[in-house]
Amino acid sequence: MNCFANRSVLLVLLALFLAGGAMAQENQTGNDSAIPPEVSEYADDWPLPNYDYANTRASNTTAINASSIGDLGIAWSFPLNATGQFGAASSNPLIMGDTVYFQDINANVFALSLATGEPVWSAMYNNTSVAGPNGPAGGWGKVFAAVDPYTMAALDAETGEELWAQRLAGRPGEGIDIAPTVYDGMVYTSTVPGLGDIFYAGSNIGIIFALDEENGSVVWNFSTVDDPESIWGNPEVNSGGGVWYTPAIDITTGMTYWGVANPAPFAGTPEYPNGSSRPGPNLYTNSMLALGHADGELVWFTQVLPHDLFDHDFQIPPILTSANISGTEQEIVLGAGKMGRVYAFNRDTGAILWVTVVGRHENDQLAALPPGTTTVYPGALGGVETPMAYADGAVYVPYVDLATTWTPESSLSVGANQTGPQPEFAPFEEGTGGLVGIETDTGKILWEQTFDAINLGGATVVNDLVLTATFDGTVHAFNRTSGDEVWNWTAPAGINAWPAVANDTILIPAGVGEEPALVALRPGANVTPPTPEPTPEETETPETVPMLAITSPAEGDEVAA
């Protein structure tokens, strides 16, 4: 389903005309006054969660390539003392000049020396209910991060002192699980409808927020559920939406692009099997949204999976690039999610240009589950789980093959909404994974590599290589043209996060196991130095504001199919 907000068409076309079609998204260029000074200054480092505003995760300014990667060794290792269901780390480091900014799964934020790994400062929040992904963004002399499940905060980039904190989550089961991004004086973030002991409980929804970077006040917000009061007709039972990963920003037009998560309950409840409590498509779940960056106005949305039964979020960070589609050059946005499909959209209209299936698929196209049990691939913890990367006409997609077995009454909800049986999840050790290269002009698969472990390490392009990592802690490097493996390395712990690269250093968060650490690899390093100890000082979160009002497109706004 694709819908276009007609009253915004002229504004978008005018912006495109004025921009002259120049979409050099791989660099931090465009409206320079809107870009934080640090993001511009350190554009060749790793200043944003996915390297640049286009979310390409592709660096070509480092000294690391197929010829030198075999010389990598551990330069330093910073221990992570956090604990979480999927390890101590589920975020991307930032690299700005000689400083690394990193957040562990317990919301603790660290500034480290890039050269040595020694801590510059630590802001310790120790919130164990954060699920991830999380992580920092930086700009205007501040570091921004979710410091508990409900609160986004700004820290002084030089000292770690908390400058402001803004409570965003309105209901007990709503919280923040996203690495924010920064642009034009604003911090962009989102809530999701599931945290800790209350997961997808009735009435919980996800809200996108733009905050003033100076004081944290809300500039605008947008409900990812199209009717946030009635929630598809049954607010006591239904929930959904929200954004788990950093949006892309087209810095020539000011448009932001967001991949939205799934509806709930899923698959259903004893009283409402097969999602019958939420008839219809359940907008805007499992959709790509285009929102104006300044006001949050919905310009278009395209839903790729109506009435999702299987927790098949469309959550992966969108990627902005251009492609030659059937002989016509188009600006496109790429998206993917746990449904195990990669989509290319026209960036101006939201029209789907191609769809490519990745990984194993079985029973995932059922409109309703039959009585009894049904095993589905991708499962609720499968498909495309972690960020993609793009370079030179190809997108690189990590995927997970892991099954979930459902009944029509199975529910993954926890807390007040948990009235039916839980689905059955295949153990992680039974899962496998893969990495595919896809041609962005056509959607054709160029090459594929498979793994004996699930792939939760994202994809990252470094010159002529593409990197990924599996949950067992193996980092792989492939020739990104041929797909041939040229190097692999075993980390000291398993991996459920994705790296940052700058100059001659790769930073790898390895957070799963008994010795979790943020590890720095450099050519020629072959001795592990003493590991620095995190600063034990804790930072208090100030009292936060009460529940905020939420908005969606106003009644009467023209949104045409």
Image (spheres, helix red, strand yellow):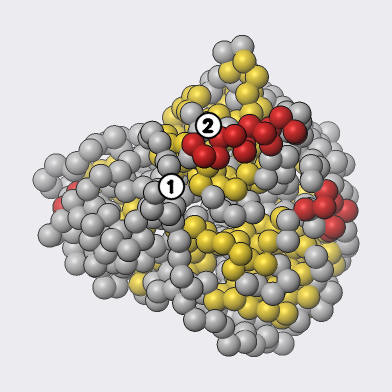
The secondary structure type at the circle numbered 1 is: loop
Label annotation for residue 349: 2
Residue 231, image x and y in percent? 30, 59
Horizontal relation, residue 311 to residue 537: left or right: left
Which residue lies at the image location 83% right of the left edge and 48% below the top edge? 32
Of the pair 247 and 296, the residue shown nearer to us: 296
Q: Residue furthest front?
A: 556
Counting from the top left corner in percent of width and height, residue 312 is at 38, 46
SS at mark 2 in the image: loop
Q: Position of residue 26 (x, y in %)?
A: 75, 38
Label 1: how many residues lie within 10 Å, few (<14), some (14-19) or many (20+)? few
Residue 494 is at least partly visible in this image: no
Name the image quarter holding the C terminus: top left
421 to 161, vertically: above or below: above
The residue to which callout 1 is attached is 557
What percent of the width, then of the height, locates residue 265?
Answer: 27, 57
At label 2, the amino acid type is Thr
Q: Is residue 265 left or right of residue 511?
A: left
Task: Check the picture and name the quadrant holding the N terminus.
Answer: top left
Q: Residue at x 77, y 53 (%)?
A: 34
Q: Is residue 31 visible?
A: yes
* 3D distance between C-alphas at marks 1 and 2: 18 Å
Amino acid under disc 1: Asp
Q: Left or right of 281: which side holds 338?
A: right
* Residue at the (70%, 58%) spot, across then down: 182
Res 181 label: none
Please report the residue visible at 23 percent of the width from the left and 57 percent of the height from the top.
233
Q: Quadrant of residue 99?
A: bottom right
51 or 110, nearer to the observer? 51
